[in-house]
Amino acid sequence: KAGVTQTPRYLIKTRGQQVTLSCSPISGHRSVSWYQQTPGQGLQFLFEYFSETQRNKGNFPGRFSGRQFSNSRSEMNVSTLELGDSALYLCASSSLRDRGRDTQYFGPGTRLTVL
Amino acid sequence: AQKITQTQPGMFVQEKEAVTLDCTYDTSDQSYGLFWYKQPSSGEMIFLIYQGSYDEQNATEGRYSLNFQKARKSANLVISASQLGDSAMYFCAMREGGGGGFKTIFGAGTRLFVKA
């Protein structure tokens, strides 16, 4: 079974631009979560999607948004980029079939650099 | 508030020896899951082991075992017979939630160095 895929793997943008990151979950997984990882703040939860609905959101400004499609693929968008948005963005999927063993599997991440 | 604490920023271990990475957590929920992930320099998060809050036995996965002490709210990872390839960042995480959605909180991580 193929793992979680994220595209692109690397991205360089300038301040003020916007960016869209894509995540394809493991086949059969309907839950997708996004995380931001920076050296200063560590791993921080952005949001979780399940069946095209955002069910949970972390403490990030409204410039960060996302969506999930009917095939469970998810996109994350950051508008009006700031230097502090430079980070590794990780996507994770889980099946939620067995809540007691809801393991999240992560993709390789997208490394975003804002100049 | 939910919180994960990893007090060891860095750890050294001799190859073939065992090492324990500490993790304490704080939650008011009764149902939660505890995870350990490994992150090599490539950046990908690799799932290692899971412990459910209602599991009575400590989880084991090959060379990895989780020392779960619920009353003390600790979930330490034990790696037996360390290998050079074990050098990486290790994150403890807690997943909570239910029908309204799930959220995973990560600790700051412990960087493990395995010496030959």
Image (cartoon, rainbow, N blue to C red):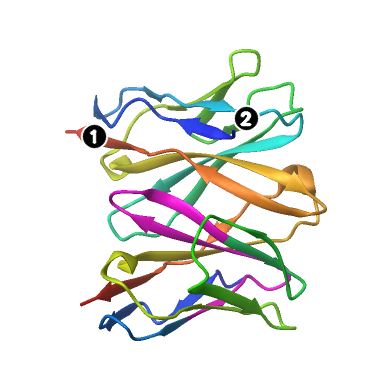
Per the image, the residue denoted by label 1 is: B114
**What amino acid is labelled 2 in the image?**
Ala
Label 2 CA crowd tier, 10 Å (few <14, some 14–19, many 20+): some
Q: CA distance from mark 2 to mark 1?
A: 23 Å
In the depicted structure, whether residue B48 falls above or below residue A73: above
Q: Which mark is residue A61?
A: none
Does the magenta stretch mainly form a helix, a strand or a loop?
strand
Q: Position of residue B51 (x, y in %)?
A: 64, 33
Q: Which residues are magenta?
A: A21-46
The disc numbered 2 marks a residue on which chain?
Answer: B
Identity of the residue drawn at 53% across and 33% down: B3
Label 2 element class: loop
Q: Are marks 2 and 1 on the same chain?
A: yes
Identity of the residue drawn at 50% across and 33% down: B4
Q: Position of residue B21 (x, y in %)?
A: 40, 26
| A30 part of magenta stretch | yes
Identity of the residue drawn at 61% across and 72% down: A25
Q: Position of residue A30 (x, y in %)?
A: 73, 69
In the depicted structure, whether residue A111 falls above or below residue B77: below
